[in-house]
Image: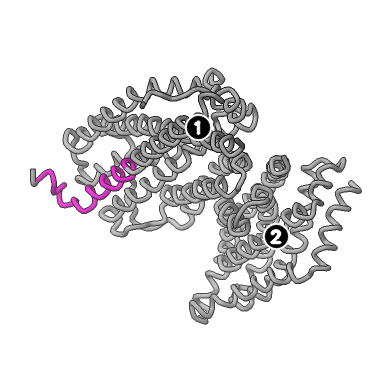
Amino acid sequence: MRAFVAVMKRDLRLSVRQGADAATGLMFFIVVVALFPLAIGPDPAILGPISGGVLMVTALLAATLSFDRLFQQDFDDGTLEQLLLSPLPVEFLVLAKCLGHWLTTGLPMIILAPILGLLLNLPAVALGVMLLALGLTTVTLSLLGAIAAALTIGARRGGILVALLVLPLAVPVLIFGVGAIDAAVSMGSSRPHLLLLGAAAAVAAALAPWATAAALRQAMT
Amino acid sequence: MFHRFANPARFMAVAAMILPWMTALAAGLLLVGLYFALLASPADYQQGETVRIMYVHVPAAWMALFVYVAMAAASASFLIWRHPLADIFAQAAAPLGAAFTAAALITGSLWGKPMWGTWWVWDARLTSMLILLFLYLGYIALSQAFDNRERGARAAAVLALVGMINVPIIKFSVDWWNTLHQPASVIKMSGPAIDPSMLLPLLLMAAGMKAYFLVVVILRMRARLLSRRVQVLKLLAAET
Amino acid sequence: MDHFLDMGGYAYFVWPAYGVVALLLLVFAVQAWHELRRQQAELTALERLGLGRRRDRQADRQDGSGGHDESEA
């Protein structure tokens, strides 16, 4: 447990000290969301209904940009090899890394999301559901991203490749997440969507660390 | 039974033996299938002659799924038992699977235009196929993204397994999404029961495509094995 | 014959569908065949240089693909 916390703290400290990386992802999130009204037009009647989808897709893209930070740097400077040699099981190491990643990318996006929802004319009733859906989605994304990041260690064009691998795998959470927000917007029940989203997050939390650990071991040999 | 073919030399010998037969079988099945699909089967009372597109569309879609499952199974046997041919099979099969998926999408679109009045609808099955195509493309891109072939093979194998777990979840989520946004006046493509006169060409074409797949996958695997050998010899030549 | 080619007025959809599938199948088959012949030719050329045969065992141990493939020769 101490090793788990130590790995997570290290990632958090690193991302605070090199704040630019995490901040760039957030800037991307904001800028892309702001592009939609410019492209589609400022009509609140059009923006409101699509705001859930816009926020979700943009969060997905912003998260995708940050995955190569997850393992590649640690691999390059040899830290990853050290970490794999530590007594901490690799699966837990991966979980610690994912948690650190979520705290530095997912959480800031959730904090910003209400303001962006305002810009997109997201109905106020849907705000709570949107935050919950975004939270579950970003957690799952951090876990899925870890698999892709581990698979592409040392690959040519790693960054763009990660996006190509993660985006199809993220289709279910995108559908459930946007479904929950849309249901809340149209005064329907978001419950089934949120339950499915939670189930997806639980499955990802159970299987992704395992797959990531396998991928990391492959990358090291 | 599989480890009998684990020895590449034996695989080459067996493959060379069955290849002509398999080629003849594939050509025969496809020709007879074409005859039944285009001439000796009735037009649908609702869809008219466009129903003939089904005889290439549905087998291609079946192959798209079959190849992915076969690829994932081979990847598992490569990762678990270090089967030396499994990764070569998986990588030889992937572009073929992607081609079948693309064929299913294009023929589906050509079928959709007269039936739905537009080239593309976000129908659950077409959408799942589209995402399957993305999974294939990701696999191919990953397997070729490394300078070290072995590393690419292993990473791609892990990805194939992750994708395999995800395929049913994606399928479910797309069906779920589709029921939420049910497009109006979509003609159901599959009736409750399919007439035997239509089933025969369908099965013949499906069997023909499967035989075709085996022929081409064997050709591709042999080329890959030979290219490995050529590279080893080149290294030896450089040393001496 | 015209009736057959017309496909009940749907010729523009039925024939391209069959054409696309036929084209894809053909391209992949020809490409695979071509690639195999190319590798075989390269291997023969290397063997003619006196490599390969003599070093068969050594090569086999390294690449794991023993034996030769002479079926098409």
**Cα distance between the residues tagged 2 and 1:** 48 Å
**Magenta-drawn stretch contains A26:** no
**Mark 2, mark 1: which one is toward the viewer?**
1
Q: Quadrant of the C terminus of chain B?
A: top right
Q: Where is mark 1, residue-wise? A: B225
Please give the label number shown on residue A64: none
Res B22 seen here: yes
Q: Nearer the viewer, residue B31 or B116?
A: B31
Which range of residues does the magenta coloring cover? C3-26
Q: Nearer the viewer, residue A49 or B132?
A: B132
Disc 1 is placed on an element classified as helix
Q: Where is mark 2, residue-wise? A: A135
The residue at the far right in this view is: A2
Q: A42 above or below A54?
A: below
Q: Position of residue A97 (x, y in %)?
A: 78, 53
Q: Nearer the viewer, residue A213 or B177?
A: A213
Residue sitting at x 46%, y 33%: C43
Q: Position of residue B14 (x, y in %)?
A: 44, 20
Q: Nearer the viewer, residue B151 or B25?
A: B151
